[in-house]
Image (cartoon, rainbow, N blue to C red):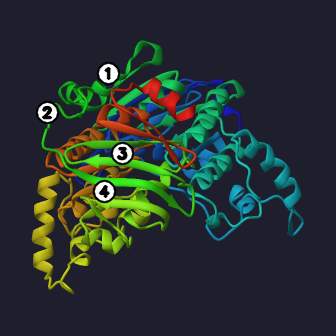
Amino acid sequence: MSSILAQGVISVRSLSKRYGGVQALDNLNLDLERNIVHAIVGENGAGKSTFMKILSGGVTPDSGSISIDGVSYPEITVQLARKLGIGIMYQELRLFQHRDVLTNLFPDREIRRGPFIARKPMEEIAKPVLESIGLDVDLYATLGDLAISDQQLIELARVIIEKPKLLILDEPTSALNARESDRLLELVRQLPSQGTTVLYVSHRLDEVFAVANQISVMRNGSLVFSRPTNELDRASVIAGIVGEEKSARISSGAKSQSITTNTTTILEVKNLKNYGQIQDVNLTVNSGEIVGVAGLIGSGADELLETLFGAKPKSGGSIFLEGKERSTLSPQNSVRDKVALVPADRKRVGLMMERSVSDNLSHVAVGGHKHGTAIVTRSGLATRAKRLVERFGVKTEHVDIRVGNLSGGNQQKVVIGKWLEINPKLVLLDDPTRGVDIGAKSELFRLIREIADSGKGVLFRSTEIAELTNLCDRIYVIKNGETRREVSEVDEAELIKLINE
């Protein structure tokens, strides 16, 4: 890539883009200084993705201009973006699942010796880049056989190999564990000193404050403010993202303020083991409370909820639901026993992305019918779906639209809504706000609190420590497959220490 960006900044003026009746960008004016990490934050629909795609050549603006090193462009094509040194890592992976890792690192850019692909020099380029991001994988392994977290790091390595002058990162840690995220953030901090300007887009404000020199807040397609990070705090950024009134509700937290005396034990787990990471887990969940599960990836915390649901087989121990032992665990039996699981990966296992909102909201209740096959009609499903859409505030034009067309927060409301349709006793929430913006998170927190306050038991795992400390009444710390501690009224720093000690 060329060094054209090394001498100047990117400035956009009056940049606008409309999709049908939706104004995605509305006269956006923004300057990106060279050799810093510039974060852009905002709710889903704020215009962040459209802005990124315009800079990288994926979308043509309706009006406005983009100035690079003093040269103005009405639009940037993919070819021009590459020539100018602009690289982008999308949250949605754009990799070839059936090809090997090395091929994915050099898409359409293989090094050739005559008619043959020269894999040795490609390996020599790839290995130090993979090492810099802490990824140790076989370059000739099939990409689809690797974990999603490894694939996300490979997507990042693919872009870094191009040595971009402007690197756009879209939710780069969404599939990474805590250690992998820390390694990536350290790499991002180093890039400006190597001549790379970073445009960092994330819903995770702790990451933004840890890595960014400048923070820009967008709302409804426009810039709210752009200021140096050291002049801002979390509260002011949240207020910029969602507005002052909504910000106050988010900052107040979601723990129950009521004192409940007539609680019953919904779930009791004794000496649980599975055939993977879980060795000896013990915990209880009472009605009306949200119980957190904290632990690093690989600690057993990430396998616990699937094991309780029956998606992963247990090898020992006992699980009691309202005092009755569950001897035969399976997803179907869990549905019939009124146990719900909102999975961590909603797009792969939580939703049928090509099906309608109506189909997704109905299929659990229909599939879990206790008396054989339920008799349903299309109009009946639509009526049910409309009721749930209204109840949970799902933003959609109509219930027949593809669920894949909804924002991340609205997709998650559909996942939760379809499970609540069976009126569960126990709700298992596995990292439910992953990839969801701060505004949608506040709505999900309110919904989760309402679920608990209705007398249900909630077991909640999250990879974000602040969510656990703000939302949960009690927290179990899992390490090396065992329950190590039970804590309440703990702050973020203390919980992080307990998880890592």
Check if mark 4's residue and mark 2's residue have beta carbons within 8 Å.
no
Above/below status of 69 relative to 391 = above
Instruction: Tell me: 323 left or right of 229.
Output: left
Mark number for residue 411? Answer: 4
Q: Secondary structure at mark 3?
A: loop
- Residue 202, x across and y down, in percent: 45, 38
The amino acid on which the numbered mark 4 sits, given as a three-letter code, is: Gln
Q: Residue at x 22, y 52 (%)?
A: 21
Q: Is residue 11 visible?
A: no
Cα separation between marks 4 and 3: 9 Å
How busy is the neighbourhood of tag 4: few (under 14 within 10 Å), some, or many (20 plus)? many
Cα separation between marks 3 and 2: 28 Å
Q: Secondary structure at mark 4?
A: helix
Q: Secondary structure at mark 2?
A: loop
Cα separation between marks 4 and 2: 30 Å
The amino acid on which the numbered mark 2 sits, given as a three-letter code, is: Ser
The tag earlier along the polypeptide, 4 or 2, is 2
Q: Nearer the viewer, mark 3 or mark 2?
A: 2
Pointer 3: what residue? 436
The amino acid on which the numbered mark 1 sits, given as a three-letter code, is: Ala
- Residue 208, x across and y down, in percent: 47, 29
The tag earlier along the polypeptide, 3 or 2, is 2
- Residue 255, x across and y down, in percent: 24, 33
Cα separation between marks 3 and 1: 18 Å
User: Foreground residue, 350 or 26?
Assistant: 350
Pointer 1: what residue? 235
